[in-house]
Image (cartoon, helix red, strand yellow):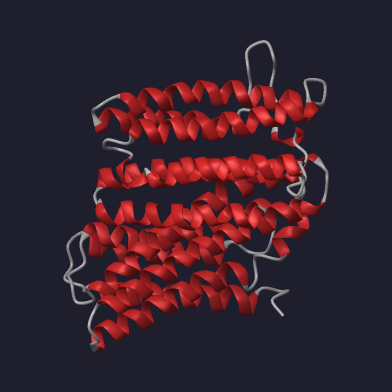
Amino acid sequence: MELFFDLVYVFAFTQVSELLYEHLTFEGALETAVVFLALWWAWNHTAWTTNWIDPERITVVGLLSVLMVISLVLSATILRAFEQRGAVFAVAYVSLQLLRIGFMVWVFGWRARIGRNQVVMFVWAAVAGVAWIAGGIVDDSHARLAIWGGAIVIEYAMPLLGFRLPGAGAVPVEAWPLAGVHLTERLQLVLLVAFGETMLRIGEAFTAHPESLAVDAAFATGFVLIFALWAIYFLHHAQPSVDPLGRSDPEALRLGGSVFTYAHAVMVGAVLAVAVAIHMTVEEPNATVTPGFAVICLGGPALYLLGIAMSKRWLGHGRNWPPIVGAVALVVIGIPAVLGSRLSDLIAAAAVSAALAVVAAVDYVREPDAS
């Protein structure tokens, strides 16, 4: 059932990348980030919910089915979320959050610790929900972006602050039960869904343009870039990252919450940005690099590497200097492009692919347990 639920996010991620593709400006990037972070919060909290309850029980299947329908509505409004469909987007998102948390309160009741925790979460989700609805009904897109940005800050800050309520104290992450292997598998699967979007983008662009040496080279470069990103995570970091989360001590729970909530959000968002960059490269390989393209083509992979470094540091898994060095190298490569160099999209993408391939090789070959 969880895998079936994730199919909605195949569509959702295509809409996020399309929103960025259509609005590759500073404001468009901010709008895309807000929409993506809302989607990630909805998916992430659903994954935590199925960490605590059996997704095969008929009542849970019913809950996930309803959440899928609402998620489809939410995803269908993404491209016009900052235009005429903002209210629908906001109502769908708030409904997702409150319905799921309300179900958990109903299942566990007020006396169980997890039930009380969910009540606190419900209050904060309702507070953020007011901001989401308010932003959805204002007509000005700039005001909507500001209000929704504030709602995102509230939602993402509350776990760090322990969902603290006046008179009720805090509910720190350490108080939440954690099935580390289950959640890690869920994160790896949703990251693969994001990689699926890169494959869709490169395939669509390649089939839509007549064959030429430049297009063929861009296609090959894009695949190498995707493969390097996949290898950096899945060839070495993915499986050992489960081990520290198999414990039940507070430190493991705190680290697990950080890795699940924040580090993987950075990685998944970065992969969606890369999908747009690859599409643009195959579409117009000889085009001169624009600042917007440079930001997603080099900044996206740099963010991905920083997400890997964050995860490694929190989990105490291996050295985190290869991805950090790689991220710095990408930023250095990107400075001339942002400042107006005459590089082509293909040359910039090739430089990124080469840098990522080096990081993947260093991380895989030189880690002590890489064999």
Residue 1 vs residue 153: left or right?
A: right
Residue 309 in the image, given as x and y percentages of width and height: 56, 58
Residue drawn at 28 percent across, 27 percent down: 143
Residue 248 in the image, given as x and y percentages of width and height: 83, 45
Quarter the C terminus occupies: bottom right
Q: How many marks?
A: 0
Residue 350 vs residue 213: left or right?
A: right
Judge whether 277 appears above or below 122 on screen.
Answer: below
Judge whether 101 appears above or below 264 on screen.
Answer: above
Residue 217 vs residue 99: left or right?
A: left
Residue 328 in the image, given as x and y percentages of width and height: 42, 62
Q: Residue 112 or 240: which is nearer the viewer? A: 112
Residue drawn at 67 percent across, 10 percent down: 167
Residue drawn at 58 percent across, 40 percent down: 66
Question: Quarter of the image holding residue 294?
Answer: bottom left
Please say whether residue 297 is visible from this viewpoint.
yes
Judge whether 182 appears above or below 43 on screen.
Answer: below
Q: Residue 217 or 129: which is nearer the viewer? A: 129
Q: Residue 222 or 244: which is nearer the viewer? A: 222
Residue 246 in the image, given as x and y percentages of width and height: 80, 53
Residue drawn at 71 percent across, 31 percent down: 104
Judge whether 211 appears above or below 274 on screen.
Answer: below
Please say whether residue 324 is visible from this viewpoint.
no
Residue, far bottom: 213
Question: Quarter of the image holding residue 233?
Answer: bottom right
Question: Quarter of the image holding residue 201?
Answer: bottom left
